[in-house]
Image (tube, rainbow, N blue to C red):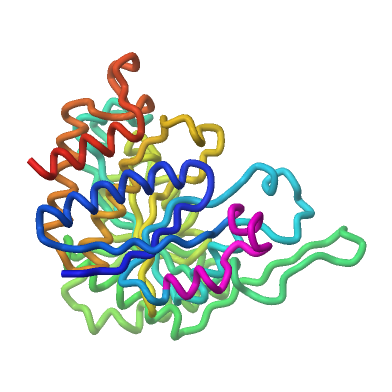
Amino acid sequence: MKFTIAKLPGDGIGPEVVAQAVKVLEAIGKKYGHEFDFTFGITGAHAIDEVGEPYPESTHQICMDADAVLFGAIGDPKYDNDPKAKVRPEQGLLAMRKKLGLYANIRPINTFPSLIHKSPLRPDLVEGADFVVIRELTGGIYFGEPRGRSENGEKAYDTCVYTKEEVTRITKLGFEYARLRNKRMTVVDKANVLATSRLWRETVQGMVADYPDVEVDYMFVDNAAMQIIQWPKKFDVMLTENMFGDILSDEASVITGSLGLLPSASVGIHTSVFEPIHGSYPQAAGKDIANPIGTVLSAALLLELGLKLPAEAKAVRDAVDASLAADAVTEDIATDKAKAFKTSAVGDWLAEYILK
């Protein structure tokens, strides 16, 4: 089969880690008889420098024409350190989510047996942890209007807005995921304080009867933040709004031992985007030391969810498991730092393993 993949490396280490995922996908293509046509697009700081905006129309059209989008990372210190910058790389990410209709972010959180010792939590707490955070991605405080600052700069405001339709759409996806897993879903909100959270809770409660086989519980976000650390194995599917999901999924990722290991999928109305959860890590850019595993596993999600190729996705995950077991990894997770692989060497190892 032939597929068109939009390739958006972005900033920092993005180009390096995306290049390794491309190697892996090309190896999958050779082994299973698929052809992947990668179309390059600019985004983030790179796009601002070239055309003055972080998600130009040309890149959007590339994404619209693709079967799936493989995305790296965006962000640059020159914008992070300038609070008065009018245009920022992160605005490109928000624009992409809105224009592609990327309403749901799916982040699997699971541990790897060979890396349990890397977790900041006790092994008995994290061993076997396996849950999914489903985060609403196009509503809430990141997109609500009005927003801004007063003329004298002494006051700033952001608005959190949700509609029942937005909540219903993401909740349906949460229930469907719960049915595929262990039929348990935790809804995280702040319904004791926020009107939007009360809308979330009321909407979910109104849908429970349609999914009688799924056990649903509700948890305030501050309690959820504590319980992720205290009892990470108690969760199966966690459903929440945009900002809460942003914070909680990053917190949860740390229990696995490395941000560089975890993938994500952003499900869209038009097409879907697959990316690692780590940032652009500009300090490592160009040094060939960044961990590409999160991006490679995002490519596995791309195969599974975006292209409906489960066997091919499993082959990628099997290769990653083998590389971790063989310590064919970058310096951030290597047992012996002196023998750590470079980013490009990890990509080569994975591609060769798949083609065996």
What residue sits 37% from the left and 59% below the top?
Answer: 70
Q: Residue at x 20, y 29 (%)?
A: 114
Q: Is residue 68 magenta?
A: no
Horizontally, residue 219 falls left or right of residue 242, namely left
- The image shows residue 251 at horizontal and vertical percentages of 44, 45
Give the main secondary structure of the magenta stretch.
helix
Give percent across and percent down for residue 267.
Answer: 36, 70
Q: Residue furthest left?
A: 356
In this rendering, position of residue 56 left or right of residue 212: right
Q: Position of residue 44 (x, y in %)?
A: 57, 56
Measured along the vertical axis of the image, is residue 107 above or below residue 241? above
The image shows residue 196, relative to residue 114, as above or below, that is: below
Identify which residue is drawn at 72% across, 43% down.
81
Q: Which residues are magenta?
A: 45-63
Q: Is residue 233 left or right of residue 160?
A: left
Residue 223, visible in the rendered structure: no
Relative depth, front residue between 127 and 153: 153
